[in-house]
Image (cartoon, rainbow, N blue to C red):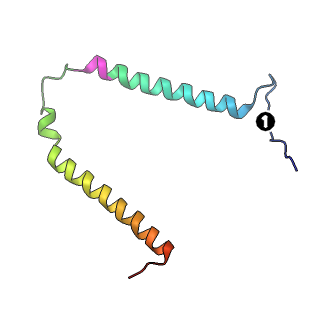
Amino acid sequence: MTHAAATHHTSMGLDSRKMAFWAFIGSECLLFSSLISTYLVYKGRSVVGPSPHEILNIPFTSVSTFDLLMSSLMMVLALAAVQRGDMK
């Protein structure tokens, strides 16, 4: 029992899903290249305002990240225990 995969060909004989995926990849390349070029153009031009160290609190961010990772780990472990039937 072999099933032929349904392909959606355009008038040029190309698979429309493949063309859509390539269009998506192209749009993502344009988006990120514009973001990176904007960053490079404006890098170091702002001399007014707070410095990054005043805005980004690294110790607090580290603790928050650790808290989120540990809560995700606990959820995964709890789900695995429920699936095993190991409820205490």
Residue 52 vertical position relative to residue 33 in the rendered view, above or below: below
Residue toward you, 70 or 7: 70
Judge from the rendering whether residue 10 lies leftward or rightward of residue 75; answer left or right.
right
| Quarter of the image where one finds residue 26 | top right
Helix, strand or loop at disc 1? loop
Residue drawn 62% across the image and 27% down it: 22
Write down the region rendered in magenta. 39-43
Judge from the rendering whether residue 44 lies leftward or rightward of residue 76; answer left or right.
left
Residue drawn 34% across the image and 21% down it: 38
Where residue 18 appears, as percent x and y from the top left, is 68, 31
Residue toward you, 3 or 57: 3
Magenta part mainly helix, strand or loop? helix
Where residue 17 appears, as percent x and y from the top left, is 70, 35
Residue drawn 21% across the image and 48% down it: 61
Residue 31 vertical position relative to residue 77 in the rendered view, above or below: above
What residue did someone put label 1 on?
8
Where residue 86 appears, as percent x and y from the top left, is 44, 78
Where residue 13 appears, as percent x and y from the top left, is 81, 25
The residue lying furthest to the bottom in this view is 88
Residue toward you, 4 or 54: 4
Residue 79 vertical position relative to residue 62 in the rendered view, above or below: below
Residue drawn 86% across the image and 46% down it: 2
Residue 4 vertical position relative to residue 19 in the rendered view, above or below: below
**Quarter of the C terminus within the rendering:** bottom left
Judge from the rendering whether residue 52 lies leftward or rightward of residue 8; answer left or right.
left
The residue lying furthest to the top in this view is 41
- How crowded is the residue under tag 1: few (<14 C-alpha within 10 Å), some, or many (20+)? few
**Count of numbered tags:** 1
| Quarter of the image where one finds residue 78 | bottom left
The three-letter code of the residue at mark 1 reads: His
